[in-house]
Amino acid sequence: MKRPQLVFRVRFLSVVVMLGAFLLLGRLYQIQVVQADVYSDKAESQYVHTKSDLYSRGSINFTKRDGETFSAASIQYGYVLAANPTHLTISADSFCEKVQNFIDVSVDRCSDRLSVSDRVYVELASRLSEEQAHSIEEMNLDGALLYRNRWRYYPGGSLAARIIGFVGYGDEGTELHGKYGLERQYDDVLYEERQVMSVNFFAELFSNLGDLVYQRKQTKTGDLVTTLEPSVARMLDEILLQTNNTYESKLTGAIIMNPQNGEIIAMNAVPSFNLNDRSQATIDQFQNPLVENVYEFGSTIKALTMASGLDAGAITPATTYYDAGSIELDDFVIKNYDGRGRGTVPMQEILNQSLNTGVSFIVQRMGKDKFRDYFLNLKLGSETGIDLPNESHGLVDNLRSPRDVEYATASFGQGIAMTPIAATRALATLGNGGELVTPHLVKEIQYNTGEVKEIRYPAGKQVFSAETSEEISRMLSIVVDDALRGGTVALPHHSVAAKTGTAQIPDPINGGYYDDKFLHSFFGYFPAFEPEFIVFMYTVEPQGVSYASETLTEPFMDIAKFLINYYEIPPDR
């Protein structure tokens, strides 16, 4: 055979082989990529259970008093119950009646689903325990199928629910991500990407042409160790629920924080919900009003005004003023809560009797600019930096008004609004030596690589001097010893510094304030000097009571007594 003919045949065969290969590749691409959904649906009716890896996600942990961790969010192990209708040896009705205590649907619905022709896989329950699965196995039902499963589980149920948050499907609806609370804030740490069990070679090839060698991005995932103490959190939830129910309030919330370093020991608001069963919960209950909502807190803010006046040197504890019961500023009349004048009054009585005219006097002595500087330095209009999502900033524009009346109302907590966490941070400066701290919930991340990362939070600004902090703490402890409920709730062996607040609620439609809707607040720290805890509480629209001293004194003192006993805080007097 001549060489030209041989070359021609070799080339011809090469072209045929290449064409065949391209046709085969094209057909495979059409089946596995273009028509993947069609063939997937056909396959779906023929197999029993989809082969996929099990769900996994980093844990969230409480920290007990002794340093031991306790799970707040983890992975629960269990089983999926399904059925293969073609393998049933009893009627669908009988099968469904036997497993009715374990399935997520009614017996009638179960029977209808098992009666559909050509179906070989019907999922009936997705979260069965080991005990439930064992019970089903003992029934020895032909056609019953059990497969291992894992899902997100919250051992505490409703414990600190608004703070922990939960997981849900993202915008694409294919992967579970954190939706609220710590689950959302630290989703990048907790989220573990589900690895592909098998790779479609042709899909990879045609979607990565020219990129034959590639690496998947590896991200570090791990567990969170929080500052939340489970026993304290449970106690707080119980007291909040009892308070809210007693006064039929719309909402009751509280924060327990270490004022020295910003560690939050417990925090929640009720009504709440069960993290494992959210079917009856509302969107409002998922949100966290302690960081997302702003309120006018009223007279609790008077403690900040008093401290500002002391620190600026505008007043001393020995300073007096004449209380006529009201003052007029910019054609507005500022009155005490009862409208009565008390004559010559020392500074201590401004706090003891919660006098609006008294804190207005302090602002006049300080001057508007100096007063504004102190309140802005307290960051009442800023975010605190707490490690929770959707934190709101306060509303303090009235502090930039030229009108005197705006500063007078701000001095007793009306006309300016802030989040409960911002109020707690500001009030903590009164007891911790005058320093703003960063409130936080997570103190450590334990990565699955074995690395442990301690979270450090920045030191805050010095707002008040240590001397001012000591003086205002002394004054606030006198409020508890002499004025609060006539001194009957004071603790004999532990000093407590505290102040109540009763505020009118703004009317967003008609302007001004409602005459019959109030917000009650209460803050206190203890021991009064070098405190270990600050507690901030509030309840929205309590019914049948007028003042915060009526609604929140007993809940606060119950919390204080629990913490003193639980942490074995030694007497300071």
Image (cartoon, rainbow, N blue to C red):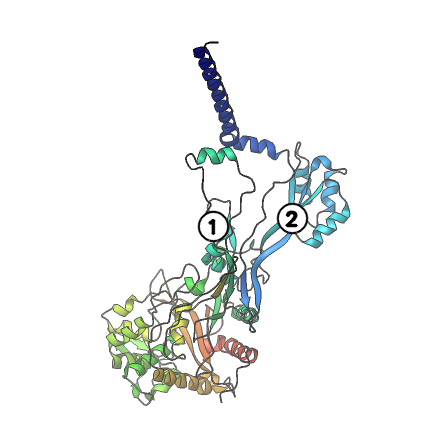
Amino acid found under the numbered disc labelled 2 = Arg
In percent of width and height, residue 181 lies at 48, 59
Dots 2, 1 in contact, CB < 8 A: no
**Residue at coordinates 27% horizontally, 73% vertically from top-left?**
373
Asked whether 143 or 450 is in front, the reply is 450
**Camera sees residue 535:** yes
In percent of width and height, residue 15 lies at 46, 18
Element type at mark 1: loop
**Camera sees residue 547:** no
Marked residue nearer the N-terminal end (2 or 1)? 2
Closer to the eye: label 2 or 1? 1
Residue at which label 1 appears: 218
Amino acid found under the numbered disc labelled 1 = Gln
The CA span between labels 2 and 1 is 27 Å
Residue 103 horizontal side relative to residue 73, left or right = right
Label 1 neighbour load within 10 Å: few <14, some 14-19, many 20+: few
Asked whether 289 or 45 is in front, the reply is 45
Q: Which numbered marker is on residue 477?
A: none
**Residue at coordinates 57% horizontally, 33% vertically from top-left?**
41
Element type at mark 2: strand
Please tell me whether residue 125 is drawn above or below residue 8 in the rendered image.
below
Q: Which numbered marker is on residue 148?
A: 2
Residue 434 horizontal side relative to residue 126, left or right = left
Please tell me whether residue 322 is drawn above or below residue 8 in the rendered image.
below
Please tell me whether residue 419 is drawn above or below residue 314 in the rendered image.
above
Asked whether 200 or 337 is in front, the reply is 200
Furthest-front residue in this view: 2
Furthest-top residue in this view: 1
In percent of width and height, residue 488 lies at 50, 86
